[in-house]
Image (tube, helix red, strand yellow):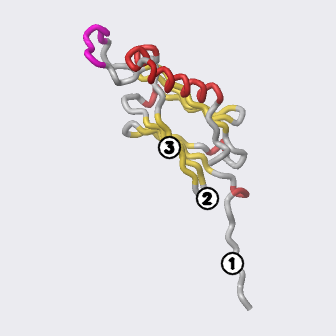
Amino acid sequence: MRDLVLSPVRFENEIDNIFNSFLNPVSSAKMNAGFNPRVNIAENDDQVDITFEIPGMEKGDIKVLVQDGQLTVSGERKFKEEQKEENFVRTEIRTGSFSRAFTLPDYVESEKILADYKNGFLEITLPKKEEKKPKEIEVKIQ
């Protein structure tokens, strides 16, 4: 789907994270307290589906906002208990805030967007406008 675009700031952050993780994987994990949830985007004739992988979060910690032709999903993942950093031998579970922004294509009906969060997955459905859906007309052969 060409029209759903990663914001320039987000793209720059992704490149920085990759570069830093190769240079110094241990300090990189400490510097990046936040996490970046993985996203799948699928499109069919009726809708665009965006699925975020965000386990360990409560529904109330996630915000989905549509404004000025942009879909923004943000939230914060926290540990259930406060733990001191010195007790950890290894920390790979990322916590902190995240924000992902996508430019909505003009064929999405933004007033009808739906979001559902279950079992660590946030599924957002972007329905297409009727006039943009492909129409099939059967032509009778004479």
Rendered view: 9 above or below 103: above
Q: Residues within 10 Å of mark 1 (few under 14, many from 20)?
A: few
Tell me residue 34's x, y (percent): 46, 20
Element carrying mark 2:
loop
Q: Is residue 70 magenta?
A: no
Q: Quadrant of residue 132?
A: bottom right
Q: Which residue is mark 2?
A: 45
Query: For this view, does 84 lie left or right of residue 32?
Result: left
Mark 1 and mark 2: Cα distance apart in space: 18 Å
Nearer mark to the viewer, of 3 and 1: 3
Rendered view: 110 above or below 10: below
Nearer to us in this view, 28 or 3: 28
Magenta-highlighted residues: 83-90
Q: Which residue is mark 1?
A: 138
Q: Outermost residue, front direction? A: 23
Tell me residue 7's x, y (percent): 64, 31
Nearer to us in this view, 16 or 102: 16
Tell me residue 39's x, y (percent): 50, 39
Mark 2 and mark 3: Cα distance apart in space: 17 Å
Secondary structure that dominates the magenta span: loop
